[in-house]
Amino acid sequence: MEVGFLGLGIMGKAMSMNLLKNGFKVTVWNRTLSKCDEVVVHGASVGETPAEVVKKCNITIAILSDPAAALSVVFDKDGVLDQICSGKGYIDMSTVDPETSWKISEAIALKGGHFLEAPVSGSKQPAETGQLVILAAGDKALYEEAVPAFDVLGKKSFFLGPVGNGAKMKLVVNMIMGSVMNAFSEGLTLAERSGLNPHSLLDVLDLGGIANPMFRGKGPEMVKDNYSPAFPLKHQQKDMRLALALGDQNAVSMPVAAAANEAFKKARSMGLGDLDFSAVYETVKLLKHSS
Ligand SMILES: NC(=O)c1ccc[n+]([C@@H]2O[C@H](COP(=O)([O-])OP(=O)(O)OC[C@H]3O[C@@H](n4cnc5c(N)ncnc54)[C@H](OP(=O)(O)O)[C@@H]3O)[C@@H](O)[C@H]2O)c1
């Protein structure tokens, strides 16, 4: 199977490498073209523009930072819209708001193309090992066609119905995750400041009803102040912002998520946006120190 792949950030690089490892022919494009070199070494071809990739491949996958990037790659000069047509499919796996997905979907449909949104749950390591959870919505026939690729990229894929449902599901999941990360950061700080060993807290948490892979994986690194990015904090804050907008549209009061969003904004203002989202821990440590 031949696929195009737009966006070679943390996720895109791991996912395109995985497709190559599993025998897919992959043509890649990245805004910073030099980032294509590493995947080319592993057998990928390069397209000079998104349009060139879409022209070459019947299915093109994208995973880009945010709504602005997702829209730019589709609508700008030499973008996806230039070459999308009947018989071609575009799958956007970026985390965006439903409105962004609807805009892209409508424009692609007007050109006779097929569109699927398919944001993913899971971070750098699941992307590397093909263990993502894929939250697809949109064109069912394109979904069926993409299942061989989804089977390589993920441990499970869901088809959630019309365009927008994948984006909404992803935002709900990340809103919960961002809120939990803040509670976890406060707990670690409280343990440490009140004289407990934070490693003992991690051991206790891991044996109880709120044990989870995020605490298990990130906890020991946070205690060491290691925030090497798997999921950049700036993207987590974008997801909180988009989830709060979804809450706004649906009149859902979300004070916990709103407070978590403020903490991520604070972390960004401290210059921590490119670090892992667990660096929000630093905002709690700082605030407690200054009081
Ligand atoms: N990392 C995770 O754990 C994770 C997990 C699930 C979902 N996601 C979501 O997946 C998406 C990608 O995340 P990531 O962690 O891979 O991000 P990343 O490492 O920051 O990569 C972002 C990608 O978007 C491209 N980009 C940014 N602005 C652009 C623009 N205006 N035009 C064209 N390309 C643009 C970047 O190109 P350059 O290289 O040129 O900057 C890069 O390829 C985000 O929506 C994120 O929320 C991430």
Image (cartoon, helix red, strand yellow):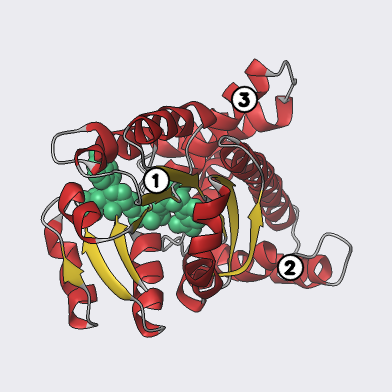
* Closer to us: 135 or 80: 80
Q: Which mark is residue 246?
A: 3
Earlier along the polypeptide chain: callout 2 or callout 3? Answer: 2
Label 2 crowd (10 A; few <14 / some 14-19 / many >=20): some
Up/down of 281 relative to 15, above or below: above
Label 1 crowd (10 A; few <14 / some 14-19 / many >=20): many
Q: Which residue is mark 2?
A: 202
Q: Quick one: SS at disc 2? A: helix
Q: What is the C-alpha distance between the residues marked 3 and 1?
A: 25 Å
Q: Is residue 232 visible?
A: no
Q: Which residue is mark 1?
A: 272
Which quarter of the rendered picture does the C terminus lie within?
top right
| Picture residue at 68% right of the left edge, 67% below the top | 213
Earlier along the polypeptide chain: callout 2 or callout 1? Answer: 2
Q: Quick one: SS at disc 1? A: loop
Q: Are marks 2 and 3 in contact (CB under 8 Å)?
A: no
Of marks 2 and 3, the one in the foreground: 3
Of marks 3 and 1, the one in the foreground: 3
| Picture residue at 52% right of the left edge, 50% below the top | 119
Residue 169 vs residue 88: left or right?
right
Earlier along the polypeptide chain: callout 3 or callout 1? Answer: 3
Q: Amino acid at mark 1?
A: Leu
Residue 194 vs residue 78: left or right?
right
* Closer to us: 266 or 152: 152
